[in-house]
Image (cartoon, helix red, strand yellow):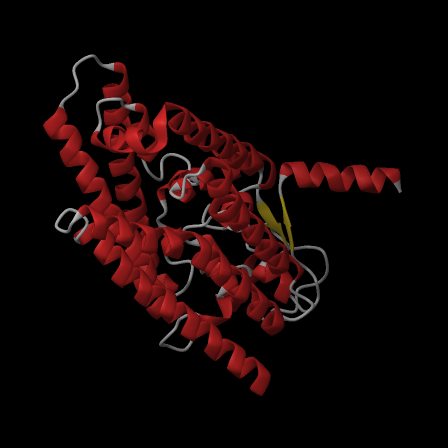
Amino acid sequence: MKKKLWEVTTLKALLLIYITLCLIIAGLNYGMGSSVSEKTHQLILKIWQFYENQFKTLLIIIGSWLTIRIIGKRSKMQKKNLIGFICAALFIHIIGPILTGNNDLYFFSMPLPWSTTALQLMAEKSDFYIRHVPLWGLSGISAVLFIYLTITIIVFLGTLIYGRRWQCSTLCLFNGFIAEAFSPAFPVFQRKKNNGAKIIPIFKILKWLLLTVNIFFIIFWINSIMSKDFNYPIANLLAKIEVYKYLSTELLMAMFLWVIFTGRGYCYYCPLGTVLGGISRIAGQKIITDKTECINCKKCDLVCPMNIIISTSAQIKKDVIDSRCVGCGHCVDICPVNTLEYSTKFLDAITRCDIHKK
């Protein structure tokens, strides 16, 4: 217990350091960038890029190591999650920037409808494009867009095969990595308690509102790319609004929820997650509950970061199908009688093939 106590304390301390540095550096980068000299601005930008790339990757590795020590040998699915996030971070934050010479590659690691950054880069008259052409060149922009398109294809095809688990619990470098690598540390300043039922209705409203806003941004930028008439004032205004939206309802709100609620707080209303939740239905994502007899210990309910009630379905051996499920597998790992299993149509087919071969 003492060993686990220092590990949890260390996780909480690292998370607080990450949050504090983000508030300071992001504040400087987004708040003072235009009001300081170019030399100072470039220094702030380099610090921000180091924070987002090398520091974040190191944080994922250390956090994953500590979490693995805490969760023990039974947590096979979560260990796979952590390995996935480490690999994703090494590619997006370390290898990718080295190969492309672009330290802002992480901006393009989340597909639509999460952000319109890629669309703004395709609009040759946008401020975003004009600012980055001198830095990246046309070949650099093409490389970034190619990587973005490749990631988008991988995310959506992967979700059709493996469900929401593919992105939300293996690849997401905005919120998913924190939720998994620091899972024993949440909430930072409160004891764990199941208060999700009270705020889920609020998150439902927020997720559809945020998705609607993002779709509006997407339609605007697609129209701007295709149209000959480019509305500079409106385009610049919407670009700024999207930055403020990101800082307030996404970055700062996600961190606030880490402190008082859960590492998966943002996952309740993430616009990309909302879309992937729908695709996961097509993929046939589910939690199978009939592998053995459920003993109704309710550990699965307590450990679920998305506040999905699993035990009720397990009692009657009914599959749990919920678009909120991020496929983290915490419920599967913690079940003392191994009655739960994460699956999709694709995984079901593989299982049937294995049984047939035997």
Residue 34 spot, x, y in % from top left: 15, 46
In this view, the residue farthest toward the front is: 39
Residue 202 spot, x, y in % from top left: 28, 55
Q: Nearer the viewer, residue 225 or 317?
A: 225
Identify which residue is drawn at 26% across, 42% down. Answer: 209
Residue 239 as seen in the image, left or right of residue 80: left
The correct choice, above or below, for 318 with respect to 70 in the image is above
Residue 324 can be seen in this image: yes
How many circles with numbers are drawn on the protein? Answer: 0
Quadrant of the image for the C terminus? Answer: top right
Residue 249 spot, x, y in % from top left: 26, 52
Dividing the picture into quarters, in which one does residue 74 lie? bottom right
In this view, the residue farthest toward the top is: 228
Quadrant of the image for the N terminus? Answer: bottom right
Q: Nearer the viewer, residue 307 or 17?
A: 17
In this view, the residue farthest toward the bottom is: 2
The correct choice, above or below, for 284 with respect to 246 in the image is above
Q: Nearer the viewer, residue 233 or 272?
A: 233
Residue 258 as seen in the image, left or right of residue 67: left
Identify which residue is drawn at 44% across, 32% down. Answer: 148
Q: Nearer the viewer, residue 152 or 265?
A: 152
Residue 242 spot, x, y in % from top left: 23, 41
Residue 327 can be seen in this image: no
Identify which residue is drawn at 32% across, 64% down. Answer: 21
In this view, the residue farthest toward the left is: 233
The correct choice, above or below, for 226 with respect to 72 in the image is above
